[in-house]
Structures are given as structure tokens and as C-alpha cells.
Image: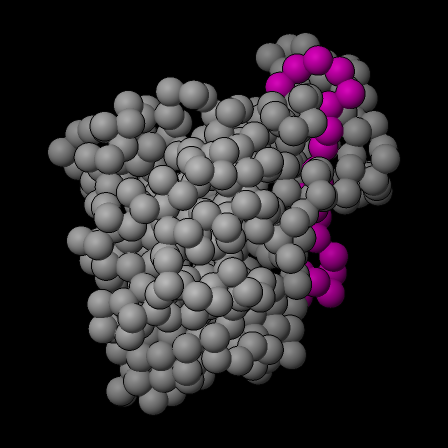
Amino acid sequence: MTDELLPSPLHDRHVALDATLGEFGGWSMPISYPGGTVAEHTSVREAAGLFDVSHLGTVPISGPGAAAHLNACLTNDLGRIGPGRAQYTLACDDRGGVEDDMIVYLAADDDLLLVPNAANSTRIVSALAADAPPGVTITDRHRELAVLAVQGPRSAEALSAALGAVGEGVADLDYMAFTDLEGGLNDGGVRICRTGYTGELGYEVVLAAEAAPAMWDALLDAVRAVGGGPCGLAARDTLRTEMGYPLHGHELSTEISPVQAGSSWAVGWDKPAFWGRDALLAERAAGPARRLRALRATGRGVPRAGMTVLDGEGGSPVGVVTSGTFSPTLRTGIALALVDTAGGVAVGDPLVIDVRGRALPVEVVKPPLVPSHVR
């Protein structure tokens, strides 16, 4: 770890577990543990895994008109949810490019929590604060709060065991719902969120950074008791790629709009105002020039981001891989790619990925590439 990288509140725990650490969004975070990424990935699909995702931003937004302000900035429509619910949403620029994707937790119209990506947190805070009406406060608590994630089919069992009596009922939370324990975040309590980015039943735990080590210890014991263990961000990446979930900087960026990325469902098209609205409406009406596709290898090889997608062996370029990996679940290479719409590529069509000069045959498939179990 260099002096410039921010340490997780759980850094000492990861070092003690002999984790491989790496840079992620300006933070030093666990990439994998000695058992390896495939084992970690499999534990989440079959039992449970514990992630430290404290690099994610944590931004409370409070005051009269807080929800209305956020709704006028971000793409999704907060009117679709009520108190105690979470929503996936996007921050776009004037051209319709995505500055960040994030989750917003609505406790009340004057009490919300935004969780942006690590590298974009400061920029999102500044943009929201610049437009905030009087009385609305945007607070950056990135260093003060920690975020842990328990994911997998036995995650509810593990979380309930770790929390004990104080966590009674958390296993019954609906998908994209949350509850506050011990007074809530503003009073040093804990927020339990039925969210995650693996495609499995799962929970995210938001709490004060100083309380995170004790919570990690309790959760790790409980996760191990159901057959799982600690998981790094490499497994989180293979898990989300199998689901076709976008990662900012890959499937979403200032050069990739929600319309191109297949994220139009996260846009409140009927809202009178949000950042990038005019550009996105125009693109939707005209149709995007490229669209995100999921690809599954039908030959041997592993696609990687930046590789060219061709319309056939020796054919013409029709797209570029945005994320590529070996799928531990499917035991084959998989990818997400931006593919030109002019060729009319559809599910079931064969394409080719240029893997360092070698043709890798792939098939266009409908995401998710493995079944989703979030509900």
C-alpha cells in the first residue's frame, strides 16, 4: 500500500488474513484471499461470502426538500419508492454520459443516504452541493462510515447469527429495503440493507468505521459457520459480470449513456428535470448507435476488456469488450461488450472476439448469464 491510498477501516483484518491488496478507486482494498477468487466466487453462489466494500462513498442528504433536490438531479424517480426502500440511479452529464451509478436509501423526504462509487464520490458530492437549495445539506462521510456485504443463499442465516437478538427480523427484509438498528446511522447505529451486487440473496451493513472491526469479526465467524469465508473485489467482479451488472468505467462512463448500457429502466423518463435529460430523450428517440450485449464463449479462451468484437472470423469490427472474465459458474469465458446496432445483432447470433490475434467464437446471450436469486 502506498501513502496515497486510503486504508479500509478493516485493513489490519485483511493483512492478518493474508489478503492480496490492491488499488481500487483510490483505496487499498482486498482483491483476493489465499483460497483464491474461484473459491470465493463459488462460496457466494453456494453458501455465503463476506466482502469489505468500505471504499464505496457514503453521502447523507438531509433537510427540507432533500428528496426533491436529489430527484431533480439523478435519473431515477424517487417517487417510485417510499421510506425504508432503496433505489438504483445514475448521475449523468449534459451529453447523457454517466458520471456515476449509485444506490440511494430513502429514510424520509428529509433524510436520504447516497452510496456512490469510490472514485466518483467527491465529484458527486460537489455537484449535488453546488445545486442544493437552502436548508439541504450534503455531507461526505466516506471516511467515517464502513460498508460490509454478506452475500449468498445462506447470507440471511449468517447475518441473523452475527447480530443476535438486536437483528431480529432482518432476514425478512424485502429486496431493496432497509432497516436501522440501535438508533440509526445518525446516532451511531447500524443500517441493514437488502442490497448487493452479486445476483444472490444478500445484505449490506453500513455502520461507523470504528465499529466495523468487531462487526467484521462477528460476520466472518457466522459466514464460516455456514460454509463460506471472506471474499475480495476480484470475486465481486466475476459475480457481477455473470449477472450482466455494469461497472462504472467499463459498462457506464461519460462516453457510455444509460440508453447504450441497457439501463433505461433506471431513468424516470416522465420527470420534468434531471441531469442529462434532453440528451437522453434525444438518444432514446433516435435509437443508440451501440448497445451493451452479453457474450458467452463457445470456444476456449478468456475475453478481456478492450478486446475487439468482430462479425465473424476475419471479419469487420462491430464492437468492443467492456468487461471479460472466466466464469467460475459456467466454466467458460464470458463478456459484456458494446456492439454496433447497425448490424442488427440479436440474442443467439454468433460473433468473434479477437483475443491477441486469435479468434474466440462467442454467442450473444440474454443477461443474466446465470440465474438471479436476489428476490
Say whether residue 296 is visible: yes
Is residue 237 depicted above or below 59 in this figure?
above
Is residue 55 depicted above or below 33 in this figure?
below
**Residue 304 figure quarter:** top right
Q: Is residue 293 magenta?
A: yes
Q: Residue at x 25, y 63 (%)?
A: 140
Please report the bounds of the magenta region as a residue range: 282-303
Residue farthest to the top? 358
Indicate the position of residue 222 as horizontal and vertical percent values. Answer: 40, 43
Q: Residue at x 26, y 87 (%)?
A: 135
Indicate the position of residue 280 as horizontal and vertical percent values. Answer: 61, 64
Say whether residue 320 is visible: no
**Residue 284 figure quarter:** bottom right
Is residue 338 depicted above or below 207 in this figure?
above
Screen quadrant of the C terminus: bottom right
Q: Is residue 8 magenta?
A: no
Foreground of the two, 67 or 292: 67
